[in-house]
Amino acid sequence: MNEEQQDVKLPSINFMDEKLFKSRSISIFGNINERIARSVAEQLLALSAESNDPITIYISSPGGHVESGDVIYDMIKFIKPEVRVVGTGWVASAATNIYLAAKKENRFSLPNTRYLVHQPSGGSRGDATDIAIQMEEILKTKER
């Protein structure tokens, strides 16, 4: 690496997050989990409190924790501003549900975006009653 390359500094994550926030944009990249759900929900609430201008979410995710995805889905539906969702890369499983939270006219895909929708799945443990309850929850998720 030469001196010129060493002097070039990449913008910090906080700087990039701030720029995205000011442009009313949120990015979701990677696995959907509780930390991501909380961060996105907080950003949606903050942007909603600031104004009713549209918000754009960029998403590329293999999916993840279903209930964490539900938090984001519900928040998109709950806030007053229109939410546009732009799919890029791989949008699968719980991420597809987040993508579908936007109204049809507010869903966009970049040229190489791929989607995966599948039946809910999960493991079960416990006695017969516990397994029956878990089965009912999976069926409820499937119906949504």
Image: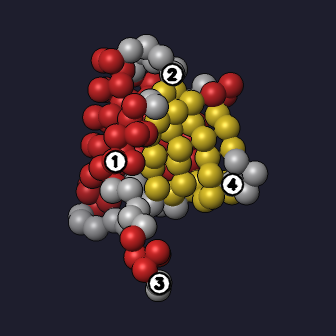
Q: Is residue 4 left or right of residue 36?
A: right
Q: Earlier in the sequence, mark 2 or mark 4?
A: 2
| Mark number, residue 113 | 4
Q: Are marks 3 and 1 in contact (CB under 8 Å)?
A: no
| Amino acid on which the number 4 mark rests in the picture | Thr
Sequence-first tag of 3 and 2: 3
Q: Earlier in the sequence, mark 3 or mark 4?
A: 3
Q: How far is the residue under mark 1 from the one under mark 2? A: 22 Å
Identify the image quadrant of residue 130. bottom left
Left or right of 55, for residue 90:
right
What residue lies at 24% left-to-right and 64% top-to-bottom?
127
Kindly report which numbered mark, 3 or 2, lies closer to the viewer in this rendering: 3
**Is residue 116 in view from this perspective?**
no
Q: Residues within 10 Å of mark 4 (few under 14, many from 20)?
A: some
Q: Tell me where residue 97 appears, x and y as whole percent.
A: 53, 43
Q: Residue at x 30, y 18 (%)?
A: 49
Compared with residue 113, is residue 26 higher up or lower down, i.e. above or below? above
Kindly identify the amino acid type of the residue bearing the numbered disc 1: Phe
In the rendering, at what x and y percent does residue 42 appear? 28, 34
Could you give the CA–CA distance between mark 3 and mark 2, rounded to whole angstroms? 44 Å
Q: Amino acid at mark 3?
A: Asn
How far is disc 3 from disc 4 in space, using C-alphas? Answer: 36 Å
Provide the secondary structure element on which disc 2 rests: loop
Task: Tell me what residue is drawn at x 64 percent, y 34 percent.
Answer: 107
Give the numbered dot on residue 54: 2
Q: Secondary structure at mark 3?
A: loop
- Quickly name the residue at label 1: 15
Residue 2 numbered tag:
3
The reply to whether dot 1 and dot 2 touch (C-beta < 8 Å) is no
Outermost residue on the bottom side: it is: 1
Which amino acid type is shown beneath numbered disc 2?
A: Pro
